[in-house]
Amino acid sequence: MSRIKEAFSHGKAFIPFVTCGDPDLETTAAIVREMAANGADLIELGIPFSDPTAEGPVIQAANIRALSAGTTTDRIFALVEDLRRTVTVPLVFMTYANVVFSYGSEKFISTCSRIGIDGLIIADLPYEEKAEFLPLCRQYGVDLIPLIAPTSADRIATIASDADGFVYIVSSLGVTGVRSKITTDISELVRMVRQSTDIPCAVGFGISTPEQAADMVRFADGAIVGSAIVRRIGELGREAPAAVGEYVKAMKQAVSR
């Protein structure tokens, strides 16, 4: 069983996100270890990019802070190698097509495989262009995780039937960010995915409170939280790891009820 499949095999999954290098890579390492120790089932590692089009202001600011601190893809690879000495939960990169292209797609994906990255989410990759990456991902055993949005309706079956790892359901239109209310009919999106595949579905974009997370996993197999965590890191800087650990603990408890 793959590590990603295993992550969803013990009940509902909680999946936190962190931007690597915000405020520095040492703090990122401490945050990831706290997340894993406090019940994260799978962790998304954001590779900072100068033009993160899917991100709202909170994660955009984190990208700027990380790049300003000198964070590079190679330094993030080294970070993952170090984390893998003790962290056993699945790790998934979330990034943009240009980051992979500019590094060299095969070099990037083969390195992911070598250092223990389980999956890859490319936020700006249209389904129609996945052939640029999917064969390489399958060759090296890295799951290319698709995103399905509320606007994907007529393409959901096609996207889901070819999915690896898990299906990332985008809860809201627009960019990432905390939302006071999520109005998308998640149950219907999950139902449509389920008609085409039995791999897990996790919901992200806009979830910040334990109540929202618990509501999402009534239908989906997991809840993903990014901006609410990144905002705490922006406020606390190097003091963030313990606070993030407590937040992850509370969110994991919420999805496990």
Image (tube, grey):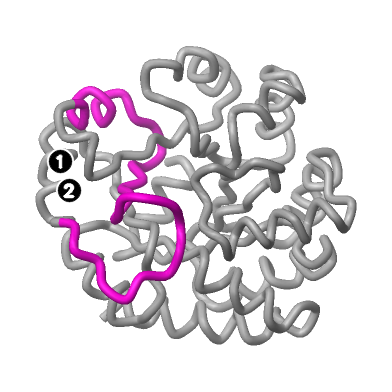
Q: Position of residue 236 (x, y in %)?
A: 72, 83
Examine the rendered structure and indicate whether residue 248 appears above or below residue 135: below
Residue 7, compared with residue 234, is above or below; it is above
Query: Which residue is nearer to you in this view: 247 or 6?
Result: 247
Q: Specify the amino acid type for callout 2.
A: Val
The residue indicated by pointer 1 is 194
Closer to the camera, 169 or 255?
Answer: 169
Query: What is the residue that sits farthest to the right in this orientation?
Result: 70
**114 left or right, relative to 120:** right
**Disc 1 from disc 2: Cα separation:** 6 Å
Of the numbered discs in the image, which one, if any, rests on residue 107? none
Q: Residue 187 placed where, x, y %? A: 12, 55
Horizontal placement of 142 versus 254: left or right? right
The residue shown at (29%, 55%) is 171
Name the secondary structure under disc 1. Answer: helix
- Helix, strand or loop: magenta stretch: loop
Three-letter code for the amino acid on which mark 1 is drawn: Arg
Q: Nearer the viewer, residue 173 or 121?
A: 173
- Residue 148 falls in image quadrant: top left
Callouts 1 and 2 close, C-beta under 8 Å? yes
Q: Quadrant of the C terminus?
A: bottom left
The N terminus lies in which quarter of the figure?
top left
> Which residue is rendered at x = 87% and y = 58% of the image?
69
Mark 2, secondary structure of its residue? helix
Q: Which mark is residue 190?
A: 2
Q: Residue 161 in magenta?
A: yes
Compared with 186, 121 (above or below) is: above
Q: What range is drawn magenta here?
A: 155-184
> Are there few (<14), some (14-19), or many (20+) residues within 10 Å of tag 1?
some
Near mark 2 (Cα within 10 A), the count class, few <14, some 14-19 or many ≥20, is many
